[in-house]
Amino acid sequence: LNQVILLRLDAAALDETTGSRSADGVVAYSAVCTHAQCPVSEWRRDAGVLHCPCHQSEFDPKQGGKVVGGPAQRPLAALPVKLGEGAGGAEGGGGVLVVARPFVGRIGASSS
């Protein structure tokens, strides 16, 4: 359950909640599908969705990893990120990507 997806998206295209968890348009999600714990391993650029090839679930990374297709019932768990200090020492300016807070949402499939 330690797989993570990182995407750089247009920051203006992110909904308000997703934008608050991103760093300059970079979003992070668990790559473990919430349907059957298969790896969410495909990016469907034309539709702008993350795709799980096992059972065809799709998730919108611009809207908090929301389910937009397939059998999954819950969004992907989001990992809030921020820019930390970079080589220049300036907070947020060209820094490194770091985890800001623990995952939001449960990772993987429901136990029920």
Image (spheres, rainbow, N blue to C red):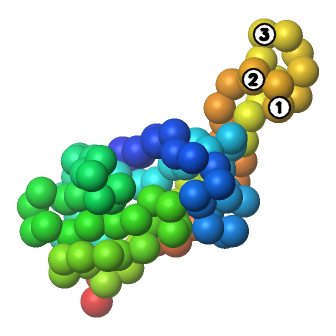
Q: Is 44 left or right of 25, judged from the image as shown? A: left
Cβ atoms under marks 1 and 2 closer than 8 Å = yes
Q: Position of residue 40 (x, y in %)?
A: 26, 54
Q: Which residue is mark 1?
A: 92
Q: Is 73 left or right of 93, judged from the image as shown? A: left
Element marked by disc 3:
loop
Q: Is residue 1 visible?
A: no
In the displayed structure, 2 sits above or below 62; it is above
Question: What residue sits 32% from the left and 76% below the top?
Answer: 68
Q: Is residue 6 visible?
A: yes
Displayed quadrant of residue 92: top right
Q: Is 109 left or right of 57, judged from the image as shown? A: right
Cβ atoms under marks 3 and 2 closer than 8 Å = no
Q: Which residue is mark 2?
A: 95
Displayed quadrant of residue 79: bottom right
Pick the residue in front: 62 or 91: 62
Q: Residues within 10 Å of mark 3 (few under 14, many from 20)?
A: few
Displayed quadrant of residue 19: bottom right
Q: Residues within 10 Å of mark 1 (few under 14, many from 20)?
A: some
Cβ atoms under marks 3 and 1 closer than 8 Å = no
Spatial CA distance of label 3 from label 2 is 7 Å
In the displayed structure, 50 sits above or below 15; it is above
Residue furthest toward the right?
90
Q: Which residue is mark 3?
A: 87
Question: What residue sits 78% from the left and 10% below the top?
Answer: 87
Which residue type carries mark 2? Gly
Pick the residue in front: 60 or 91: 60
Which mark is first along the chain, 2 or 3? 3
Which residue type carries mark 3? Ala
Element marked by disc 2:
loop
Q: Position of residue 46 (x, y in %)?
A: 27, 52
